[in-house]
Amino acid sequence: MDTETTVRTLFALAGVSPPEDEMAEFIAGYPATRAQLDALYAVPDTPLTDGILVFRPTE
Amino acid sequence: MADVPLTITDAAAALRAGDLTSVELVEAGYAAADRLDPTLGTYITRYDETALAAAAAADAERAAGIDKGPLHGIPLGIKDIIACEEGQTTGNSVVFDPDWFAGKDAPVVARLRAAGAIMTGKLTTMEYACGLPDASKPYPVPRNPWDTECWTGGSSSGSGAGVASGMFLGALGTDTGGSVRFPAAFCGISGMMQTYGLVPKSGCLPLGVTLDHIGPMARSVADCAAMLEVMAGFDPSDPSMIPGVTAGDYSSQLVGDLKGVTVGVERANHLYGENRDPALEEVFEAAVAVLTEAGATVVEVEIPYYQEVAAATMLCWPVEAFVFHKEWLAERWTDYGRYTRAVIGAGALLNAADYAQILKVRRIGKAALDQVFTEVDLIVSPTTSVGATRHDVLDWSALMGAIFTPYWDSVGSPALAVPMGFTAGGLPLSLQIGGRVLEDGLVMRAGDAFQRLTDFHLQVPSLVTHQPA
C-alpha cells in the first residue's frame, strides 16, 4: 500500500477527517514516523520482553 | 518582586522571622504580574481575591503560633491543566468540558494547600500540554522574560516565565516528554521530574498516561525539594502510582556535597551535530567541573538505546493522547489549534503492534539503563542544546532535535533541570541530572550541591529588574 493510501486509511479507521491541506502534511511526514517506528523493531529482544504487556487482575 | 526574597526557602525564613507577611509576598507577585504579564502572557486566570484572603489567613495563623512548614504562606502558580477549586481548568483550549473536576482540587493541589501554600492562579500552557504556541486561539502567547522575542519553552510555559519573573515563588508543571524541564531550561529556573508514579496525577488533564508527571518548578532545587515533599505519596485516585509509595525527606538529603557519589557524563548522545549553541560545550564542561568540585567522582558513560528510547517517548504519547481526544477530534477538529491537532492527530497513524513495540522498547531501555546505574549513581547532560528559541522561527522538528528530556520520561527515572550558564546572547542554558528510580533525593542533592557553588539560578532577567520611569 502506498503512503497516501495508508495514511488516509488509518485516519478513516480512526474516524477522523483532517482537511486536505493538513492531510497532505500528515502524508508527507508519515515516512519519517514510520522509519522511527521501524527502528524500534530493530532493538534486540531480551528475556524481559515476555513481561512487557502484563495484565494483573488485581489492579 | 525585587524587594522580596527570590526563593521559597528565603521567603519562608523571612515569614518565620516576621520580616515579611504572606500578604506582602502575594501582593508583590501580583504587582509584578500587573507590570509584566501584558507582555509575558503568564496567567490565564488570576485568583487575586481568594489568594489574598488565603495569605491573610496564613499570616493570622502564623501570628497565632501555627507553622505549617516551609510552604506556609508561599504563593504558587498552577499550570492550567491541573484542577483548582477556585475555577475551571481550560487546558488552554476551546475544546474542553467546563464540568471536568469543577470546584475540586487535584490531590496534589489539595496537598499543597493543606501545607499552607497560596494558589495565585492558573498558568498558560500549550493546548492540552502539547504542540506549539498558537496566536489564533484566545489564550496568551507565552514570552520569555530573558528575551520577549523568544519562547518560554513548554508546555509548562507560564510556570517557567512566572517563576523567572517573580510573579510567584513556585509552580506546578507537568512533564510527559520534558514539559517541566524544557521551560525550566529556557527560563533559567529549576524543574524536577520525579520518579513516575511518585506524585498523584488525578485531577490533571492527561496527555500520555504512561508518561505524565506533575512536577515542581522553582528557582532553587531546595525549593523543588520542599514542594515535592508535600506533593509525593500514594493516592488511590491515581491507578498509575507506585503502590504504597511515600514521600521522602528530600530536604534533609541536601547535604551540600557529592562526596562518595559517582556521576556519569553523557556526551555521546548530547554533544554532537550542528543544532547546538556555540557556548554549550564550554558551559557544560564548566558545570561538570563544579560537580567535581562538590566532591563527585566523574566518569564517562553512554546510555544504550538512547535514541530509540527518546523516540519511543515522542511516539508513545500521541497515541495515548489520541485515545483521550478521539471523539472531540472527530467532531471539532478545527477547534483545536493547528499544532495540537498535528501532533495528537499523528497518534492515529500508529497501529496496535507499534504501540506494543514502543512499550517493549521502553522496558528494554530501562533494563539497559539499570545496568549503567550499577556503575554510576547519576547521569548528567545538557537539558537542551540551545537557548530559548525565537517565536518567529519556532519549528517542531528542529526543537525536538535540540531537547534532551524525552529519554527520561520513558524509563520512569527522576530527572532534574538546573541553570548552568548562558549563551553568548545571554539566554539560560541548563544541566540535566538523571538518577535511579526512587532516588529523587540523590538527584536533588546533586542539583542543590551545584547551586551552592553557583548562582545561575538566582539571576534575574533585566526585564524584571528594570523599573519603568
Image (cartoon, grey):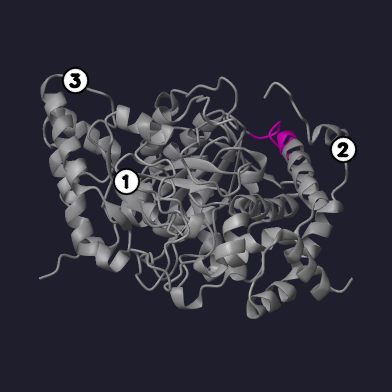
Residue at position x 57%, y 48% in the image: B176
Q: Looking at the image, do the residues carrying marks 3 and 1 touch, with CB atoms under 8 Å apart?
A: no
Label 3 chain ID: B
Q: How many labels does the image show?
A: 3
**Badge 2 sits on which subunit?**
A
Q: Residue A46 carries which label?
A: 2
CA gap, disc 3 and disc 2: 56 Å
Q: Horizontal and vertical percent for residue B125?
A: 43, 57
Sequence-earlier tag: 3 or 1: 3
Per the rendering, the mark at residue B66 is 3
Res B205 seen here: yes
Question: Residue B427, relative to residue B156: is it above or below?
Answer: below
Decide whether residue B118 is among the magenta residues: no
* Label 1 sits on residue: B87
Question: What is the spatial separation of the Cα atoms under label 3 and label 1, in whole angstroms?
Answer: 28 Å
Label 1 element class? loop
Residue at position x 87%, y 74% in the image: A2
Decide which of B177, B106 is in the foreground and name it.
B106
- Above or below — where is B457 with respect to B463? above
